[in-house]
Image: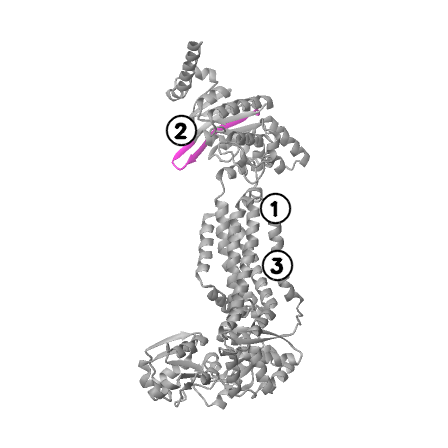
Amino acid sequence: MSAQVAAAFAVLPRYLGWHVALSASALGLGLLIGLPLAVAAARAPRLRWIALSLASLVQTIPSLALLALFYPLLLAISAALLPFHLKVPALGFLPSLLALTLYSILPILRNTLAGIRGLDHAVLEAADGLGMTWFQKLVRVEAPLAAPVAMAGVRTAAVWTIGAATLSTPVGQTSLGDYIFSGLQTENWVFVLFGCGASAALAISVDQLLGLIEVGLERRDLRRVGIGAGALAIGVCAALGPLILADRPHDRYRVGAKNFSEQFILADLITDRLRSVGASVEVKQGLGSAVAFRALQANDIDVYVDYSGTLWANVLHRTDIPPRAALLTELTRALKSKYGVTVLGSLGFENAYALAMTQNRAHALGLTSLRDLAAHAPELTLGADLEFLSRPEWAAIQHAYGLEFKSQHAFNPTFMYRAIEGGEADVISAFSSDGRIAADHLVVLTDPKGAIPTYDAVVLISPKRAHDQRLMAALQPLIGAVPVERMRAANLMVDRDADKKTPAEAARTLEAHGP
Amino acid sequence: MNTGAGIEFDAVVKVYGSITAVDQVSLHIPYGQFVALIGASGSGKTTLLKTLNRLIDPDAGSIRLGGEDIGAADLPTLRRRIGYVFQGIGLFPHLSVGENIAMVPSLLGWPKAAIAARVAELLELVDLPADLAARRPAALSGGQQQRVGVARALAARPAIMLMDEPFGALDPVTRDTLGQAYRALHDALGLTTLMVTHDVQEALLLADRIVVMKAGRILADDTPQVLMRGHDNLDVEALIATPRRQAERVRALMEGGA
């Protein structure tokens, strides 16, 4: 427990710094767009209608989806700009900034408009009658009188932005969301609570300081405005300090990880190897499965571990299932020629998709293979992870064995194991390297027809690093050095309920045995 | 029509949809006159008044000020030369009384010392205590607020004052006091005043000249003395009849009581 708290505090300066940098930039950009837009829209009814409709439309998109949408959009822009040798990063800060900025505009726009349009008509007539130019009227009358109402909108925008910034983790931007996403994945509730608490505390502090400014504006009390603005400025500087002061070598490796425990552990394993040769490393964790390969291909990350069958089906769109060695050879060749991505080699274990049941249930029904399962499937419930049901492997299994379940539900992997334990699911889509298979007394059903491809864990290197000898040399010892039993044990250390370890600790046990 | 001196409305027209608010109005007001515009609501008196500082631009006709067409004038410059006081007052709630009065001089870029001196002078002129300068408008009574409104309009020493129902929202006593005080200022400062009012009695007692409007046209244009003697036009006569009858009854009361 205390190790987890210590681990949480250790990364706080970096997570908080990025979180503040991201939310402050998004809010600043939102103000830069929202305020002039409100001033213009207050005078032009058609612009007002269009601006408010668009801003409201953005709000109807769930914030996670909005963040995710910017990734393919920026990829397309990046591709379009390629002939001009302009590189637009599709991952990390930029997509998060753009999405959060869009998100922050509505409250700023709506409240500023309400503030301006709610002004006393007599006051505006007096301003005109006295001979103010439109700019004098804006600066001397409209802005100061509308400021308190506009400020209420800025407060709302700030709270939303800080909250939604936690969702930038899956598009590769470090934020306080890293605690929540990795904590949820490894059932590290200390991390989840820590992430929620930290972002809530940040949102409340910022809201209170903005509230002080709002009251100051209302009462024409410059002292309050000054204290509020000063405290905000100091807070932002203090939060950004560690980021700026941290040594930022030009050549920093970015290690990617998808959103489950094994990936966190392997990312830490790779990080440790790179650090051991004196390299500087940054981990981009919690990436979506498809995002990870695209990010590598676009050089947004330098190295990560993926699985041969996944790449075979999802990246190469192949439906045939060659033997293990042939698949790996062809994969290595195709990824290099099509995408410039290097397959350094297999780590030595497989993390295949498999269907698993409790030993008791399988025994009672007399099931050992997927062929046996087909007869009983209509009475059974399938629990799958979030991806499985939409993956080609599931289509292949269904096609090969004619599986039709009574019902099927998608879970976060962690909760999927809870479901089979609690009886909400009879069969689950397990991973063969998962430590919980043995620990939870599950049995993996065999695949006599060979419908599921092999899933060797392979280390992938980005096109940019294809000739990086230091990187290759540092990672080469990992090839073939992680047998499945060792991986299962490491995964279990992180996933189990009692005596939980952090992914970094689990990675260290792999090394202790390892290369 | 002589040109070059005063305000000249020449065949001014303003149309709102199917309603002609001001219909071919021509009017010459020499500098120094106090003119009251009266008539029922919708008669076009406020519209006509606002064409002079171009809060409303006419659809046809022209308006000259000292011989120059105001249609070509720079708007802020024109308005800063014309004082404007209206029923809504429109004091800036976020500024002090002093800052309100100082607005036009500050827009004109007067030196700070000159502005401060002018604010003090104006507060005295409109009969308000000097320490009111630091207060917010909300802390003042309605009568005091309109005194500030008048002071603000006079701040940059305009030669012309436009007043749109300036005392309409005040109680009768305050209204009478302020009316008389303003008339005294008009004389002392040599202003030219155009005042819209629906209070015929106020118009009769304050103005040198009364212009009666109906449906965008001028029905009568005479001194109070002439109008009080009666008028051929029934609408004009109806407007004048009430104050005349009231005045006679008050006189009878006073003579009977004596």
Front position among marks 2 and 1: 1
Label 2 environment density (alpha carbons within 10 Å; few <14, some 14–19, many ≥20): some
Residue A447's x, y, as percent? Answer: 40, 88
Colour scheme in the image? one colour
Apparent side of residue A266 relative to residue B48 in the rendered image (left or right): right
Graded by Cα atoms within 10 Å as few (under 14), some (14 to 19) or many (20 or more), the crowding at tag 3 reads some
**Amino acid found under the numbered disc labelled 1:** Leu
Identify residue for label 1. Answer: A222
Against A139, is B213 above or below? above
Please state the chain letter of the residue tagged with numbered disc 1 in the rendered image: A
Are the residues at dot 3 and dot 1 in contact (C-beta closer than 8 Å)?
no
Q: Amino acid at mark 2?
A: Ala
Numbered badge on residue A208: none
Mark 1 lies on a secondary structure that is helix
Q: Chain of mark 2?
A: B
Instruction: Give the residue at mark 3.
Output: A235
* Circle 2 residue: B215
Whether marks 2 and 1 lie on the same chain: no
Point out the stretch of residues depicted in magenta. Answer: B4-21
Neighbours of disc 1 within 10 Å: few (<14), some (14-19), many (20+): few
In which quadrant will I find the C terminus of chain A? Answer: bottom right
Residue A253 picture location, percent across and down: 61, 75
